[in-house]
Image (spheres, rainbow, N blue to C red):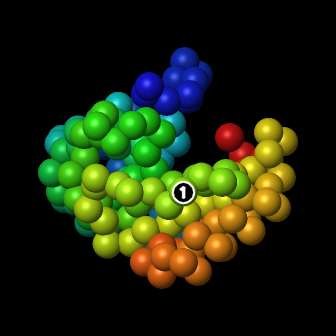
């Protein structure tokens, strides 16, 4: 499993042009968030160094199936496969989607922050039984917090 992103309609950028484009839309932020599909398929040490040299901090949202280059400032991992397939080490935050009845995860990854997201229905509506279940899990496991997948509610894929 890599990702479900369609890569054929994308635009290829030269590194200098990419950094220029980021600067044109950064709104004064010094953070770049790499997300969408599996960014571990594209990121490399050259990009990490170039972004840092340009003054940016780097966050990544990954499924954890690809080893990541050194120097990423914040790693959020939402595993979609069995723990033994993960290729990242310690992460800053770990996120799991939970359906009603699924237990609390027992992750092999070390993380500073742990989040559970209630599942959504196929049409993106928050599943109420899953929400109630996640709230119960969190009340029984205070190291975990809730995170709602806003992109589902907004119908953004």
Residue at point 18% right, 57% down? 71
**The N terminus lies in quadrant:** top left
Front residue (pair 19, 58): 58
Q: Please say if 155 is above or below 25.
A: above
Q: Position of residue 150 (x, y in %)?
A: 69, 60
Front residue (pair 13, 62): 62
Q: Please say if 1 is above or below 139.
A: above
Front residue (pair 98, 157): 98
- Quarter of the rendering containing residue 81: top left
Can residue 71 be seen here? The reply is: yes
**The C terminus lies in quadrant:** top right
Front residue (pair 141, 1): 141
Classify mark 1: residues with Cα within 10 Å, few (<14), some (14-19) or many (20+).
few
| Horizontal arrangement in the rendering, residue 98 relative to residue 55 (left or right) | right
- Quarter of the rendering containing residue 56: bottom left
Residue at point 50% right, 66% down? 115
Residue at point 28% right, 37% down? 84
Q: Position of residue 70 (x, y in %)?
A: 15, 51
Q: Where is residue 10 in the image (x, y as percent from the top left)?
A: 53, 27
Q: Where is residue 132 in the image (x, y as percent from the top left)?
A: 74, 68
Q: Please say if 132 is above or below 50.
A: below
What element does badge 1 sit on? loop
| Horizontal arrangement in the rendering, residue 82 relative to residue 67 (left or right) | right
- The number of numbered badges drawn on the structure is 1
| Horizontal arrangement in the rendering, residue 99 relative to residue 88 (left or right) | right
Reading the image, the residue beneath label 1 is 103
Q: Please say if 137 is above or below 62.
A: below
| Horizontal arrangement in the rendering, residue 80 relative to residue 49 (left or right) | right
């Amino acid at each position: 499993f890599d990702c479900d992103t369609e890569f054929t309609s994308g635009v290829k950028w030269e590194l200098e042009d990419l950094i220029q484009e980021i600067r044109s839309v950064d709104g004064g932020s010094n953070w770049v968030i790499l997300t969408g599909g599996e960014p571990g398929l594209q990121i490399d040490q050259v990009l990490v160094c170039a972004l840092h040299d340009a003054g940016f901090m780097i966050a990544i949202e990954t499924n954890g199936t690809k080893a990541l280059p050194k120097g990423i400032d914040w790693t959020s991992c939402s595993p979609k496969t069995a723990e033994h397939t993960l290729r990242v080490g310690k992460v800053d935050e770990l996120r799991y989607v939970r359906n009603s009845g699924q237990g609390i995860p027992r992750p092999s990854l070390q993380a500073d922050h742990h989040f559970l997201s209630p599942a959504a229905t196929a049409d993106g509506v928050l599943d109420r039984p899953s929400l109630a279940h996640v709230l119960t899990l969190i009340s029984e496991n205070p190291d975990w917090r809730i995170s709602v997948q806003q992109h589902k509610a907004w119908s953004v894929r």
